[in-house]
Amino acid sequence: MDDGDAKAAADGGNNNNNNNNNNNNNKVIGNSLVASSGDGGGGPPCKDGGGRGGKEKGRNKRGLVSFEELPEYMRDNEFIRNYYRCEWPLKQAFLSVFRWHNETLNIWTHLMGFVLFVVLTVANSVRLPQLADFMSPFIWNFAVGANNASTNSKGIFQAGQSLQTDIITSSSGPLTEAGGLLDDMYSSTTTWPFYVFLCGSMFCLLCSTICHTFSCHSRPVSLLLLQMDYVGISVMIVTSFFPPIYYVFRCSPHWQLLYLAGITAMGVCTAATLLTPAFSAAKHRSFRALLFMAMGLSGLVPAVHAVLVNWDDPRRDVTLAYEGAMGLFYIAGAGFYISRVPERWRPGFFDLAGHSHQIFHVFVIIGAMAHYAAAQIFLEYRSRLDCDLIGR
């Protein structure tokens, strides 16, 4: 081979190398464009049937994916490795309530909590005096009918008729008195603060259930539902203050107004802060939890005040025990939420059951039930007391 042929061969080799490099660069640029085109801007687009659960696609079901396959906006907890729903249609997201994935227990814990509080609300709205009022016309008509029948009888039944009349006359007075006593017991104390707490709890639990069910649909829906979830938590914390503050300071309206206005203002500010889209990111998890904890811990001020003004109250220790338990459960739940324990100790092992958010949900339900028990004591006890008797 002469010098000309060698030079031509070298030039040809260089051209081929340049072409290969250009092709590789084009592939890299193309892949980058594809990756950046998915919702979230930082993660890959969702692929139906990928990851775990992909074999179910043939049965007209969406597949579950791994954490690495999620768009950036859906990446919240890197210690939960698999079983994610990724950008599912709303219908499939709704039907996924009855499927097994890493949000199933998050959905059902608060869904069952919502149903529980609905039942409690209905049960508390049905009062014994209402049942007595419903039954009394039937009891009275039966007695009058029996009296008329005995009046039309022969003289042999006159003694029985006289005895029956005496029984009716003697029993109607205590029955009416008992019904009036029950009516006074329930009407003497305003019940709306108690129902404000129940409605706030139901709103929070329902918002949480909806969020965990449909946040897998798209980025705009996910952001909207997360914000709704934060508002629900704020509402639940605020409304939890209404029964204890209203009933403990029932005879001190200025303290009622001060404390209830204060916690309501804190709730509005917290909700407004968390409605900022940036604070929905996973990196602000601790900040969100600390805001909610600050709202709850602000209740220490009226709690100490309540202890002082009720120092000789025999029910003080019982209500303090319930409210203390509520605070401990809420703080423990927030601790699991922030630390992401136990899944951080063994990533992937708690994907379906036992991870921190599920534990957080359970503690929220238990804490709300402890507060419900305390609110029942406030309601029942205050219905029997008068401000003049209390001396405040």
Image (tube, rainbow, N blue to C red):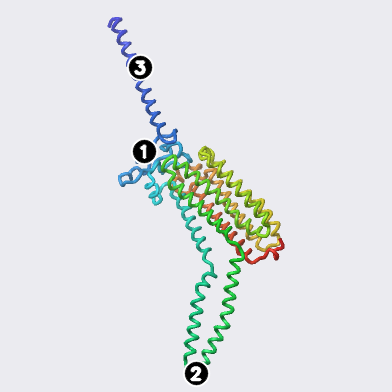
Residue topped by disc 1: 47
Rendered position, 206 above or below 190? above
**Mark nearer the N terminus (2 vs 3):** 3
Element type at mark 1: loop
Element type at mark 3: helix
Element type at mark 2: helix
Pointer 3 local density, CA inside 10 Å: few below 14, some 14–19, many at least 20: few
Indicate the amino acid at tag 3. Asn
Discs 1, 2 touching: Cβ within 8 Å? no
Indicate the amino acid at tag 2. Gly
Q: CA distance from mark 1 to mark 2?
A: 94 Å
Rendered position, 108 above or below 6? below
**Mark nearer the N terminus (3 vs 1):** 3
- Looking at the image, residue 300 sits to the left or right of residue 23; the answer is right
What residue sits 61% from the left and 56% below the top?
A: 323
Q: How many marks?
A: 3
Q: Quarter holding the N terminus?
A: top left
Q: Quarter holding the C terminus?
A: bottom right
Q: Which mark is residue 155?
A: 2
What residue sits 63% from the left and 63% below the top?
A: 382
Q: Which mark is residue 130?
A: none
Rendered position, 392 above or below 64? below
Q: CA distance from mark 2 to mark 3?
A: 127 Å
Coordinates of residue 189 in the picture (x, y in percent): 61, 63
**Mark nearer the N terminus (1 vs 2):** 1
Discs 2, 3 touching: Cβ within 8 Å? no
What residue sits 55% from the left and 58% below the top?
A: 195
Coordinates of residue 300 in the picture (x, y in percent): 65, 51
Q: Which mark is residue 18?
A: 3
Discs 3, 1 touching: Cβ within 8 Å? no
